């Protein structure tokens, strides 16, 4: 069983080393690939210095394109399973290992790490606390995605996922460059893949700030809803091939 | 009162291009087509994107040369003023062209993304084979897997 853990990174030189060390500790068998999405800082050099593989995109193209690069690499190099987590230190590698175990046990094709599934859990002091605009966006997306997929999702924008080869081949061909997380979930469910959410612990970000301001959030939410609506009318791949 | 009546009777007759505007339109159409030919000649415009512009130039020329054509189109559209017909046709044409360009742009954006990804993957693959050759930790992990 070969596993690739890839980490999309855009200007994350401050936190990338710690994330790599964390993955090495909890997933010693996995190969690590950092996908540098056109960083202007030393992300590529830092990651190379850590001795992991680095795929450097020549210019910034958005999270979706970076994630797709990871899926494409995993597919081409024949990995059985893959997983990705954010480079800012919000995602503990121990939790990624739990997601991977679900895929390895073949209980799901795609497993999403959710920070919301289990709200009753005791919160540690460094646990993730969402902001108001984040909470509004989350509930709007949750509502529409549940409507679109008829499956309950709580953390639609989670960037911590594990997947098998079915998902790799789907996502390496179809992955929206600017609405990666949400549209990909809709796509996977529409293609009949088994998508599952797992409650995970997430931390406050170690470095950098979120790109979301209230106005941007509103626009982001509006765009997301449009994308979901359009996605409902896309032809299914399985049908198109018939 | 009388000027209102004359205005009303003038509106009843169809409004069409004057000879002056027809000559001007024909000249502009010719210049436009020459410009396109020149752009193709100097490799500034690919042939496949020039066809639509060439057709547009020919349409302009035809409209200027045969005003009856424009009048026919206006009648078909149920428009009394041929100028209004002309404007609405041109507007729709431009709208279609803009949409066409958006489609082309989207395709090219997807192609550029894929190109960048292929290059990034190639580099990572190269790095993987190099580190395998010099026997670093990734070779160890490969042995562990085997």
Image (cartoon, coloured by chain):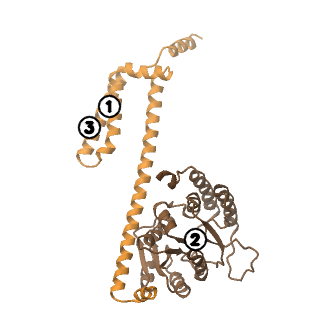
Chain colours: A brown, B orange
Percent x, y for residue A159? 57, 71
Q: Disc 3 vs disc 1: Cβ atoms closer than 8 Å?
A: no
**Looking at the figure, which quarter contains the C terminus of chain B?**
bottom left
Callout 2: chain: A
Neighbor class of circle 3 (other Cα within 10 Å; few <14, some 14-19, many 20+) is some
Which residue, given by chain and number where applicable, does mark 1 sit on? B58
In this rendering, the answer to whether A46 lies above or below B13 is below
Judging depth in this view, the residue of A48 and A235 nearest the camera is A235
Q: Which residue is mark 2?
A: A159
Q: Check if mark 2's residue and mark 1's residue have beta carbons within 8 Å.
A: no
Name the element at disc 1: helix
Rendering coords of residue A111 (x, y %): 60, 71
- Left or right of A22: which side holds B103? left
Q: Nearer the viewer, mark 3 or mark 2?
A: 2
Q: Residue at x 57, y 54 (%)?
A: A227
Asked if both marks, 2 and 1, belong to the same chain, the answer given is no
| Quadrant containing the N terminus of chain B in the rendered view | top right
The residue closer to the viewer here, A180 or A162, is A162
Numbered disc 3: secondary structure: helix
- Image marks 3 and 2: residues in contact by CB distance under 8 Å: no
How packed mark 2 is, by other alpha carbons closer than 10 Å (few <14, some 14-19, many 20 or more), is many
Horizontally, residue A78 falls left or right of residue B64, namely right
Residue at numbered disc 3: B34
Q: Is residue A57 above or below residue B136?
A: above
Q: Earlier in the sequence, mark 3 or mark 1?
A: 3
Spatial distance from mark 2 to mark 1, Cα to Cα? 54 Å
- Figure label count: 3
- Residue found farthest to the left: B41
Instruction: Give the residue at x 43% y 58%.
Output: B110
């Amino acid at each position: 069983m070969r596993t690739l853990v890839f980490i999309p990174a855009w200007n994350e030189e401050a936190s990338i080393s710690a994330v790599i060390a964390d993955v090495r500790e909890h997933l010693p068998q996995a190969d690590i690939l950092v996908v540098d999405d056109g960083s202007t800082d030393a992300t590529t050099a830092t990651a190379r210095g850590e001795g992991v593989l680095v795929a450097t995109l020549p210019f910034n193209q958005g999270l979706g394109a970076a994630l797709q690069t990871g899926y494409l690499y995993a597919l081409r190099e024949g990995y059985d399973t893959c997983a990705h987590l954010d480079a800012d230190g919000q995602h503990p590698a121990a939790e990624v290992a739990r997601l991977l175990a679900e895929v390895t046990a073949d209980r799901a094709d795609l497993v999403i790490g959710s920070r919301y599934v289990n709200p009753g859990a005791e919160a540690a002091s460094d646990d993730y606390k969402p902001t108001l605009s984040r909470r509004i966006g989350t509930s709007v997306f949750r509502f529409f995605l549940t409507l679109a997929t008829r499956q309950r999702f709580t953390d639609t924008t989670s960037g911590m996922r594990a997947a098998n080869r079915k998902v790799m081949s789907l996502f390496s061909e179809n992955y929206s460059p600017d609405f990666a997380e949400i549209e990909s979930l809709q796509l996977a469910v529409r293609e009949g893949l088994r998508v599952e959410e797992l409650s995970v612990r997430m931390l406050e970000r170690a470095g950098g700030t979120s790109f979301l301001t209230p106005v941007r959030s509103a626009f982001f939410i509006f765009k997301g809803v449009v994308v979901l609506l359009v996605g409902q009318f896309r032809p299914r791949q399985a049908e198109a091939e018939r | 009162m009388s000027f209102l009546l004359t205005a009303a009777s003038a509106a009843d007759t169809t409004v069409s291009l004057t000879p002056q505007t027809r000559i001007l339109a024909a000249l502009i159409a010719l210049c436009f087509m020459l410009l396109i030919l020149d752009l193709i000649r100097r490799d500034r415009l690919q042939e496949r994107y020039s066809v639509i512009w060439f057709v547009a130039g020919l349409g302009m020329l035809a409209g200027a040369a045969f005003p009856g054509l424009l009048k026919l189109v206006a009648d078909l559209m149920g428009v009394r003023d041929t100028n209004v017909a002309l404007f609405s046709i041109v507007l729709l044409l431009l709208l279609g062209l803009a949409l066409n360009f958006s489609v082309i742009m989207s395709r090219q954006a997807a192609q550029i993304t894929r190109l960048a990804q292929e290059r990034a993957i190639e580099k990572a693959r190269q790095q993987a084979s190099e580190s395998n050759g010099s026997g670093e930790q990734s070779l160890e992990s490969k042995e562990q897997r085997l």
